[in-house]
Image (spheres, rainbow, N blue to C red):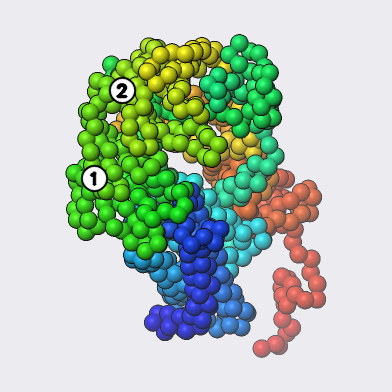
Amino acid sequence: MRTLLWKELRENIVWAVLVMLALGGAEIYVLHHLRYFELVELNFNDGVTLCKRPFLIVTMFGCAMAGLALGLLQVLPDLKRDRWAALLHRPLPRGRFFWGKALAGVLLYFLAAGAPFLFCVWQAATPGHFNAPFVPAMACPALADLVTGLSYYFAALVIGLQGGSVLLRGLPFFAALHASFFALHEKLFRVAVESSLAMSLALCLAGWGAIHLRESLGGRPWLGRIAFLIVAFYGACGFGDLLETTGELAGRMGILKFSVWEVLDNGVPVREDYVDEVLVSATDSTGQSFADPKYHPDRVRGHLLGMNVATSYVGDPHGWRRPRYQSFYRESNHLLYAYQPYSHPRLEQWFHIYDNPRCIGVLPVEKRVFAQLGADGFASPDSKVQPFSESDIVDQTGGDILVIATPQSLRFAHLATQQVVPVALPAAAPIYGMCHTWASIANGSVDFKGVAFGKAMAVYDVNAQLVALLPYHQDVDRWGSISLGVLSTMDRFILRYEPSMWMDWKTRKSMTNYVEMMDSKGNVLASYTLPPPPLHENPPLRSTFVADRLRTPTFFFGEMLYRRLGAALGSSRLRAALEKQLGPDWPNTWLSGEALMLVALVLSIVTFFWARRAQLPPRTVWAWTLGVFALGLPGLLMFWLAGERPRTVTCPSCSRRRRIDAAQCGHCGASWPARPPDDTLIIDGTSTPLPAGAA
């Protein structure tokens, strides 16, 4: 084993080094690349350091290509006839021969793909390289790509070792591709890594089985046969993922229609009607079109008022809490948030860190942390600060002031002087939320901050000065989702009331909305009642519609059972997913389940007659039939590509196909005909008496 391991490392180390240099160069370039060639990159929409989208594109494709290339370069040269025979005739079991190659390949892969990853993590974690703080979880997306690339390495081994048709040998690649799709769309890092490791294990065992017997599954160890069938199933799923992704270009199965209420820059509500994402009409609350040309459908979106929701629920008599949606591990906005990163030039940049919640100040030019802000105030970079609690809200007014709100208090943190100033509450506590809004002016915009209390909305300017206190004039128990806007004159304020989130979705969609224009003293200057817009018509994509009805029945119903069990055990994430599936999505869930069961039944019948025609044993026929019924279309593809069928020839008696290894024809029951005597027979089966006197 040691000799084999050394041989594989010696022969393939050059390829690993070349892959390491190519992949490492690409990762380092995109990690340090400055957008628009600016001196300091302060636009964090594409992610922060290790979560930058260009960097993750390189790691996703680069690790997959590295694993696939190293696996093929390791196994294909050995498949030459004389060399392969010489290798297999060594006094070493084939299984140990495979494990020696695989162990060497894994070491080479982690050298080629892991070394650049570790170098990039070191650079991101070391001060002086980037203008953003480092959070260890930033390394998770690239680490998931690194683990997923391992499945491509084992897929390459199976591709090289497996015999048969091109389609059959391509299934391992599509199985690894399915692992990539899953890791790309899964929200939890742990689940993404576990699925990639499980796929790598299945591909590894499939390759171990293939080295025992390349052409047939029958002579392989039972574990290798099972692993290859699993690989074949997920290979069919990966091919389906690819078809579904490319099929999104086919469009929807109907016309997308929806209507929304917005507010114009003069404070008047406007209803926008969209057809196939094209704005076709803009009308006021009475249904009339606007006379002003700038509010016509072709220009109205450039004259909308900037508004944000300050609170989705005022009061707590219903015990409702906003559900926590699972964050996506591949995005940096669940780890940290950059406050106002668009002002240039910017001498300092502040970030809100969600893990151990606190704020960190960075000097972009020097690329180092210079201060921290916690619940107990400002501190030096090396000091330990008290983190904010879950009920604290920290946001920026738009200038150099951070607003820190707890349910019972309000403080302004002045970043320039690093001082925290308590502010007397202008209305009765508690505070239910905050929002940022802005007034558009000729030279840009002016920022404002809205703080939602139980009876009124307080509005602060960029210097943290109270400019208005706007009392509510609606029943905020039912219309407690409140948005704030400021007109360009900066002395007119807009409050929009929408249904509170504690009510169910159907009730909210049937309720009216309200819009009020007020002055700085809270006097209502205009009030509008907005009827509920028609429900959205959102037909599914053609590819999604087909994919939902060709899913695996076992996975479809198994996922529902898994969510039900998880909800019973206290998982809020699985409970929210189950409520959505059985609530608003129930019509689509029912139609999809009904359709896929019908499709699975039809496919199982096809499999039954196909297996009978192939003259498989009755137990095998029923096993494949039930397997296809449980697995759906991927199961049928497994039977087509990976299911072994006996060789058949034409029966001399009935002219139908019969198994070559059966003594009697399965159709007519005839035996094989006796071979006619000819001159090639040494013994013709007859006895001849010896002549007299013969010894």
> Relative to 103, is 672 on the left or the right?
right
Q: Residue at x 65, y 46 (%)?
A: 246
Does the rendering let one see residue 501? no
Q: Which image quadrant for residue 134?
A: bottom left
Which element type, helix, strand or loop, lies under badge 2? Answer: strand
Q: What amino acid is labelled 1 in the image?
A: Gln
Q: Residue at x 61, y 49 (%)?
A: 242
Q: Which is nearer the eye, 274 or 340?
A: 340
Q: Which residue is mark 1?
A: 419
Tell me which numbered mark, 1 or 2, is placed earlier along the sequence. Answer: 1
Q: In the image, is residue 265 above or below residue 326?
A: above
Which image quarter holds the N terminus? bottom left
Which image quarter holds the C terminus? bottom right
Q: Which image quadrant for residue 260?
A: top right
Q: What amino acid is labelled 2 in the image?
A: Phe
Which element type, helix, strand or loop, lies under badge 1? Answer: strand
- Checking the image for residue 622, the label placed there is none
Mark in front: 1 vs 2? 1
As measured in the structure, the alpha-carbon distance from the residue carrying label 1 to the one carrying label 2 is 25 Å
Where is residue 575? Give x, y as percent: 37, 31
